[in-house]
Image: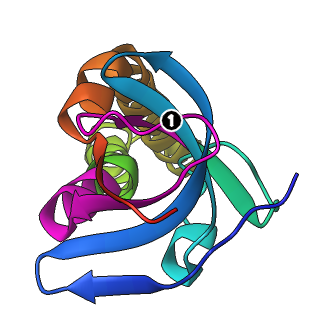
């Protein structure tokens, strides 16, 4: 499969990237494959690992067809919010768990171990809550096809 990336442009408040439609799901939704942006490669949110390309589900309100090269846009604020949810909240939960555990288990001989375990429990709980709300987040943070290139 040939994937074409023409350019990535951050036009102020919007991240724009180009990709190829590989599947049309319905009248308003498609799957676009594109080369990962350098900031996207380190994120891992798309669960593709080290592959250079990613496939994302996008809104297709302009009736793009299978095989079209399209411009896909997403507000930068949405990208930052998604990164905050995926990385900052779990990190805060880890640190909070360790802090709370240190206070609660300070008199116990293995208090430090329990504090670390509590931190990891809260970290895990935060990821489970994020995972449980994943469908809602996908709808809120969905990219949109804004232009058919070819």
The stretch in magenta equals: 56-84
Q: Residue furthest front?
A: 150
- Quarter-of-image position of residue 43: bottom right
Q: Position of residue 60 (x, y in %)?
A: 32, 34
Q: Is residue 145 visible?
A: yes
**SS type, badge 1:** loop
Q: Position of residue 135 (x, y in %)?
A: 34, 18
Q: Nearer the viewer, residue 148 or 91?
A: 148
- 28 horizontally vs 149: left or right: left
For image coordinates 26% across by 40% down, the residue present is 62
Instruction: Establish if 25 lies above or below 127.
Output: above
For image coordinates 47% across by 30% down, the residue present is 30
- 139 horizontally vs 107: left or right: left
Look at the image and say whether residue 70 sits in the magenta stretch: yes
Look at the image and say whether residue 17 sits in the magenta stretch: no
Instruction: Establish if 38 lies above or below 61.
Output: below
For image coordinates 66% across by 52% down, the residue present is 54
Q: Is residue 108 visible?
A: no
Q: Position of residue 53 (x, y in %)?
A: 72, 60
Question: Which residue is under mark 1?
Answer: 65
């Amino acid at each position: 499969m040939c994937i074409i990336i023409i350019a990535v442009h951050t036009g102020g408040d919007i991240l724009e990237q180009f990709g190829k439609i590989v599947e049309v799901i319905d009248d308003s939704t498609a799957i676009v494959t594109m080369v990962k942006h350098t900031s996207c490669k380190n994120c891992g949110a798309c669960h593709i690992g080290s592959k250079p390309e990613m496939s994302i589900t996008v809104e297709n309100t302009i009736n793009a067809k299978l095989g079209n090269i399209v411009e896909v846009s997403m507000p930068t604020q949405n990208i930052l919010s998604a990164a905050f949810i995926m990385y900052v909240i779990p990190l805060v939960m880890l640190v909070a768990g360790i802090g709370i555990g240190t206070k609660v288990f300070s008199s116990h001989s293995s208090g430090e171990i329990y504090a670390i375990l509590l931190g990891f429990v809260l970290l895990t709980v935060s990821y489970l809550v994020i995972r449980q709300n994943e469908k809602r987040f996908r709808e809120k943070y969905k990219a949109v096809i804004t232009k058919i290139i070819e």
